[in-house]
Image: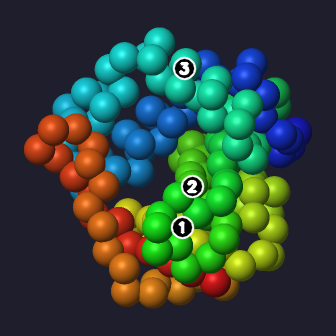
Amino acid sequence: MIDRVREATAADAEAVALVHRASWLETYAHLIPVDAIAERFRNHEARVARWIGILTNEDAYVAERDGRLVGWAVAGPGRSDDAPRDRELEGIYLLAEAHGSGLGQRLLEAAVGDAPAYLWVADGNPRAEAFYRRNGFARDGAIEEHPVVDGVALTAVRMVR
């Protein structure tokens, strides 16, 4: 298999949107109702348009396996008023089929390197939290409810290094 991580471009928006939806179904179905996930990603065209903006204005990277996009990462200046660091890992997702391949590590390194940074991770996602701990992140006590759709939220904890 040929694996690679590269900078994302606007041309990746369609594939990133599909990976985003699929990875949410794989990762969060035990935490929130599947129909809420489906509703969040219902308007695919709007998601692709949103991703075009993100991929052209943020530090964004994609992971490919044999030429097929299987993951992505986005980082930028901290979005929170009380940001504990200047850099935020805004999102990193990898399809389950690529877990353990090293692509997640390569995405993290591309997006934030070893610089001080923070991120939000779903509470109840032990695989992701262990990954971040291996990379020097630790919970700092901050907890937020991140809205998914009306009436459904995902509890997230902040990790900092």
Local secondary structure at mark 3: helix
Q: Quadrant of residue 38?
A: top left
Image position of 136 (left or right of 36): right
Q: Residue furthest left?
A: 151
Give the residue drawn at x 32%, y 20%.
42
**Mark-to-mark CA distance, 1 and 3:** 23 Å
Task: Please give the residue where the numbered disc 3 appears in the rendered image.
Answer: 48
Q: Amino acid at mark 1?
A: Leu
Establish if 146 lies above or below 59: below
**Is residue 51 something one can see in this rendering?**
yes
Sequence-wise, the earlier of marks 1 and 2 is 2
Label 3, residues with CA under 10 Å away: few <14, some 14-19, many ≥20: many
Establish if 131 lies above or below 55: below
Label 1, residues with CA under 10 Å away: few <14, some 14-19, many ≥20: many
Sequence-wise, the earlier of marks 1 and 3 is 3
Image position of 53 (left or right of 64): left
Please provide percent x and percent y for residue 127.
49, 68
Please provide percent x and percent y for residue 123.
33, 69
Local secondary structure at mark 1: strand
**Is residue 124 something one can see in this rendering?**
no
Locate the C terminus by quadrant.
bottom right
Task: Please give the residue where the numbered disc 2 appears in the rendered image.
Answer: 90
Local secondary structure at mark 2: strand
Q: Are marks 1 and 2 in contact (CB under 8 Å)?
A: yes
Label 2, residues with CA under 10 Å away: few <14, some 14-19, many ≥20: many
Please provide percent x and percent y for residue 103.
75, 53
